[in-house]
Image: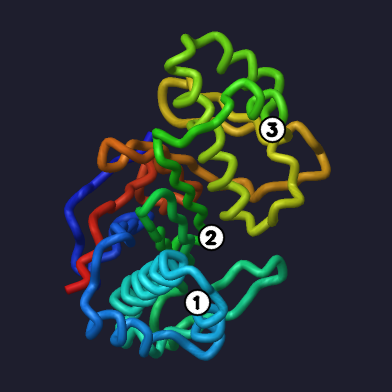
Amino acid sequence: MIKLNTTAIESENHSSDVVIRYMNIAHKFSNDRIRLWQSWLDEHEQQRLARMSKPYLQQQYLVSHAMVRSVLADMSDQLPQHVQFEALQQGKPMMVPVKGQPMLHFSLAHSHGLAAVAVSQNGPVGLDIEHLKRKVSSLAVAKRFFSKKEYLDITSHTQEKQQYRLLQYWTLKEALVKAEGWGISVGIDCLEFDLDTGTRPLLTVLDSRIVPRERWEFGQFNLLDEYLLAIAAYPSPQNPSLVIDCAPWSWL
């Protein structure tokens, strides 16, 4: 079970297990704002941005990375352009810790014009988000990527509810893979979730060669009535359930 707080917290108050900020990346921003955000990017980010040929991909990359830098900067008491990153073994980016500040872990996701970033100081975090109108062949995808138990659960629902059920499983699996930093080589059909526990999604690993961290807690909720969001994170010892602070990114 999660406790969801949709009111923004002050940067010096990190009582939540996970801070989530989201943004409509299709918004029309002023040229001055675009230039400001570009000035925050490091050399590697500038090069990646320059290699993108399609304007909407450039805006998606720039806005989402500006949001990540802004949120991390607020929570680590520094300027966005001073936030530094390093790549872990699987290529997952991690913020370089600031002396005297807690270690911040983050995960970025975007879908159909919305970007969201999750930040935690309890440990690694994984975030996935999907648009509820996403066109998928529910049964074909479920048969290929999900466990037999999950597939049977999806097919037990009416046709109009099958896609939502599939997205519930899909986002949870993606959130866990991102939190672990496993990459796309891990077979997500070996990660079996139970959605009917009455409290929170529970994970069973069907392949002994896959060894996840032991403390994961999972949360899932709808956002803006159009998106489904899933989170894999570490709860803090003082919180009986995962406490999530979710609010729009205040970029002005």
Q: Is residue 24 left or right of residue 164?
A: left
- Mark 3 Cα shell of 10 Å, populated few (<14), some (14-19), many (≥20): some
Q: Is residue 102 left or right of residue 94?
A: left
Q: Nearer the viewer, mark 2 or mark 1?
A: 1
Which residue is under mark 1? 95
Quick check: 79 above or below 140? below
Q: Is residue 249 left or right of residue 185?
A: left
Which residue is under mark 3? 145
Q: Position of residue 149 (x, y in %)?
A: 66, 18
Q: Amino acid at mark 2?
A: Pro
Q: Which residue does the image show at 48% across and 81% down from the upper left?
A: 97
Q: Amino acid at mark 3?
A: Phe
Marks 3/2 in contact by CB < 8 Å: the verdict is: no
Q: CA distance from mark 1 to mark 3?
A: 32 Å
Q: Which residue does the image show at 49% across and 33% down from the upper left?
A: 135
Frontmost residue, 162 versus 18: 162
Point out the tag, 1 or 3, that comes first from the N-terminus. Answer: 1
Q: Position of residue 117 (x, y in %)?
A: 40, 60
- Mark 1 Cα shell of 10 Å, populated few (<14), some (14-19), many (≥20): some
Q: Nearer the viewer, mark 3 or mark 2?
A: 3
Q: Nearer the viewer, mark 1 or mark 3?
A: 3
Frontmost residue, 10 versus 133: 133
Q: Amino acid at mark 1?
A: Met
Please identify the quarter of the rendering in which residue 20 is found: bottom left
Q: CA distance from mark 2 to mark 1?
A: 11 Å
Q: CA distance from mark 3 to mark 2?
A: 24 Å
- Mark 2 Cα shell of 10 Å, populated few (<14), some (14-19), many (≥20): many
Quick check: 82 above or below 88? below
Q: Position of residue 126 (x, y in %)?
A: 51, 53
Q: Position of residue 41 (x, y in %)?
A: 43, 85
Which residue is under mark 2? 124
